[in-house]
């Protein structure tokens, strides 16, 4: 007798994106496998999506929040979900009809899979937005294969993936305390992927499952604040002390370079504000490290090979990084060797 299909709860967090949110919900309802429930968290204090959603999709469970941030709003949606899996979909994204079916196939074939994501395409359906994302040894993360032609291929493991469309085992999500409540916007996806690996779950990327995303990279001083703050909070609270010590020269050098970049581009005040916020959260960092250490299954040595030596993306341009490329590659080789030499058994946090 075939195993029962797992129940999937879909969660969409929206902020004043009415038409796109309605389309995102419609794409969930058109899936080739049924979705157990759809939860929309309206994060707009004016609750602009309430009446249109009730009219177009009265069966959707609608929660209202007062702009509490993307990650906390996702957690509010997950808290009322009853499915075995949580499928987070951005409000400006639409899943292909077989997207969830292909993701669930990977879940069935790979019991250790805890996070599974599709290939994210721009609206033209032929150009990659994200999917198998990349992360540097300093924690800088970027969209993998950004603006390249869409790819085809079997599912494969990835260190980090995108949160634009992410299927997560509900039990794993709750064990990890969900997306980081400290993160108002940005970086919640690489952070939860790293934590998933650490506690022994696998992260998978499925190119043949696709989602169209109305994405614009966009940069602002406030965005840089969130990205820098959350990158540092994540790295300092997830990596083992021995790993942080080995990476300290690279991380300090990177911070010095970023200060010069921030000054040249006009967001130095926001970079310094990120430092202040990280310092103020030092108690939270220690407490989170302890909680994660109690759940740790894999040491950093088991995943350090997957971190990149150079930041290589059209989204992030760095002349210093390009010139220092050979040195960074050599440093990565030495750092990876050193982390592995510390031992493959988990050490104290």
Image (cartoon, grey):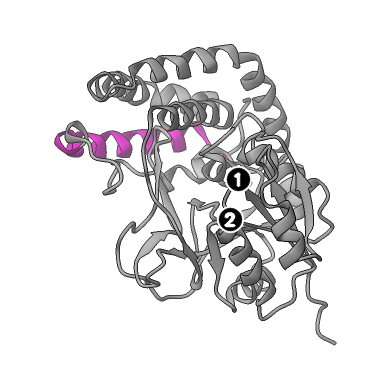
- The residue depicted at 66 percent of the width and 20 percent of the height is 284
For residue 55, the mark is none
Front-most of 25 and 155? Answer: 25
> From the viewer's perspective, is the residue at label 1 or at label 2 nearer?
1
Q: Earlier in the sequence, mark 1 or mark 2?
A: 1
Q: Measured from the top left, where is residue 122 in percent x and y?
A: 40, 64
Which corner quadrant of the image does residue 285 belong to? top right
Q: Position of residue 8 (x, y in %)?
A: 75, 65
Q: Which residue is mark 1?
A: 15
Residue 168 location, quadrant? bottom right
For label 1, the SS is: loop
For this rendering, which residue is in front, 1 or 256?
Answer: 256
Magenta portion: prevailing SS class: helix
Dot 2 corresponds to which residue? 91
Q: Image point 34% across, 22% down: which residue?
A: 267
Circles 1 and 2: CB distance less than 8 Å? Answer: yes
């Amino acid at each position: 007798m075939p195993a029962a299909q797992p129940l999937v709860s879909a969660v969409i967090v929206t902020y004043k994106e009415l038409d796109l949110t309605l389309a995102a919900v419609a794409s969930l309802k058109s899936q080739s496998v049924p979705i157990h429930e759809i939860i929309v968290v309206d994060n707009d204090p004016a609750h602009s999506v309430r009446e249109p959603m009730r009219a177009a999709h009265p069966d959707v469970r609608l929660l209202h929040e007062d702009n509490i941030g993307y990650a906390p709003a996702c957690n509010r949606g997950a808290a009322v979900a009853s499915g075995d899996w949580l499928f987070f979909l951005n409000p400006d994204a639409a899943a292909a009809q077989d997207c969830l079916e292909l993701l669930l196939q990977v879940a069935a074939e790979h019991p250790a899979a805890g996070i599974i994501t599709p290939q994210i395409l721009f609206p033209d359906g032929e150009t990659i937005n994200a999917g198998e994302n990349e992360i540097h040894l300093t924690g800088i993360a970027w969209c993998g294969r950004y603006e390249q032609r869409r790819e085809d291929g079997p599912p494969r493991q990835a260190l980090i993936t995108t949160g634009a469309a992410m299927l997560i085992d509900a039990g794993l999500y709750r064990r990890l305390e969900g997306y980081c409540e400290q993160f108002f916007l940005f970086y919640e996806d690489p952070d939860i992927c790293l934590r998933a690996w650490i506690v022994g779950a696998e992260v998978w990327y499925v190119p043949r499952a696709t989602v169209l995303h109305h994405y614009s990279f966009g940069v602002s001083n406030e965005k840089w604040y969130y990205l820098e703050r959350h990158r540092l909070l994540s790295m300092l609270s997830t990596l083992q002390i021995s790993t942080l010590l080995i990476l300290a020269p690279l991380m300090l050098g990177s911070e010095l370079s970023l200060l010069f970049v921030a000054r040249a581009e006009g967001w130095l005040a926001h970079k310094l504000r990120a430092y202040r916020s990280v310092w103020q959260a030092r108690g939270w960092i220690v407490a989170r490290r302890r909680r994660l250490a109690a759940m740790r299954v894999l040491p950093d040595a088991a995943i350090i090979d997957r971190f990149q030596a150079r930041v290589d993306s059209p989204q992030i341009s760095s002349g210093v990084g390009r010139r220092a490329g050979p040195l960074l590659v050599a440093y990565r080789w030495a750092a990876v060797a050193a982390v592995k030499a510390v031992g493959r058994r988990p050490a104290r946090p």
